[in-house]
Amino acid sequence: MISKFFQRAALAAAALAATMGGAVAVDISGAGATFPYPIYAKWADAYKKETGAGLNYQSIGSGGGIKQIKARTVTFGASDQPLKSEDLEAAGLTQWPQVIGGIVPVINLDGINSGDIVFDGPTLAQIFLGEIKSWDDAALKKLNPKAKLPSQAIAVVHRSDGSGTTFNFTNYLSKVSADWKSKVGENTAVEWPTGIGAKGNEGVAANVANTKGSIGYVEYAYAKQNKLTFTKLINKEGKTVAPTTPSFQAAAAVADWAHAGGFYQILTDQPGAQSWPITAATFILLPKQPPDSAAAAEALKFFGWAFANGGKAAEELDYIPLPAAVVTLIKKSWAANLKDASGKPLVN
């Protein structure tokens, strides 16, 4: 079952949306990635209490967020798949990272607890290719000689919508498995060789929670809040690591944001003995010349507040706040790239 946390978050988001018209003069709307929804909902609730300003965020997947911001139907879009500089230029957008998190394999096996099972990249790819079909497969037994793996069919659960979580997951599988790269590849939506689809991180979490013998992939906050069983992974250095704040930080530490055009960074399969292999940043997309400059300015106030005040809340949900030096670079990019209709900067 989806946890009470997400039920409360959904109610809070609905309440925020309902109050937009009356309490707040400027409508701030966003849509996109489900990956950061838990922390965006928590930030929005705290920001509302502190400032009186509301936020309506639609957790519809990165693909939907990119489409909506390109159509200018929301103030900002959110995506876990960063757009390349040429794509940003063509769409008249700017982007920046807002927070970092980890994507984790989650399973539903009786008698198996979080961290009892370990996968390496190639074996994980074989499962999602449909080549490993049973939990007692020899490859899984070799990796987990002490685990009591049942003779039970593996039920693969994947995303059915355009998803930045899927982009990062398939990007990782493409790096560690030549077969995956050639047969499936990486994207926000792919032709899955096997399994059933579910919408959003919420949908995958719910399906895994309710399906014995299943495996899926979700942002870590969804695994934690829904009490799902997560696995360990063997990283690029051959070390077995668990999904933890330090392992996400280790992977994020190698990012060179200062020299990344449009802040384009992929954090999967990073070097480092402690690095979690499927770490990802989530990004905000905003038009360089927004159709509603007042709403865009209000959105920037919210994201600036989140950078300054939202770190503790992010860490409580096992997200990684961006370092102060990166926040400084982001704010400089706001001043340089975001203009109103008259060409005046939205922020100084």
Image (spheres, rainbow, N blue to C red):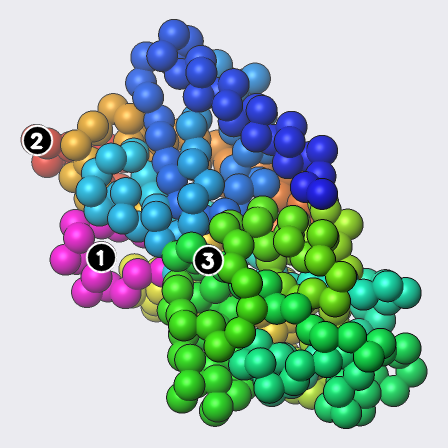
- Above/below status of 16 relative to 159: above
- Using a 10 Å C-alpha cutoff, classify the residue at mark 3 as few (fewer than 14 neighbours), some (14 to 19) or many (20 or more): some
Check if residue 343 falls in the magenta segment: no
Helix, strand or loop status at disc 2: loop
What is the quadrant of residue 84 in the picture? Answer: bottom left
Q: Furthest residue to the left?
A: 342
Q: Quadrant of the C terminus?
A: top left
- Residue located at (48% from left, 32% from top): 305
Residue 330 vs residue 165, the one in the foreground:
165
Residue ID for mark 3: 160
Residue ID for mark 1: 88
Q: Earlier in the sequence, mark 2 or mark 1?
A: 1
Residue ID for mark 2: 342
- Using a 10 Å C-alpha cutoff, classify the residue at mark 2 as few (fewer than 14 neighbours), some (14 to 19) or many (20 or more): few
The CA distance from mark 1 to mark 3 is 25 Å
- Above/below status of 234 relative to 263: below
Helix, strand or loop status at disc 1: helix
Q: Are circles 1 and 3 on residues that touch, CB within 8 Å? A: no
Q: Earlier in the sequence, mark 1 or mark 3?
A: 1
The CA distance from mark 2 to mark 1 is 21 Å
Residue 201 located left or right of residue 258: right
The amino acid type, in three-letter code, at marker 3 is: Ser
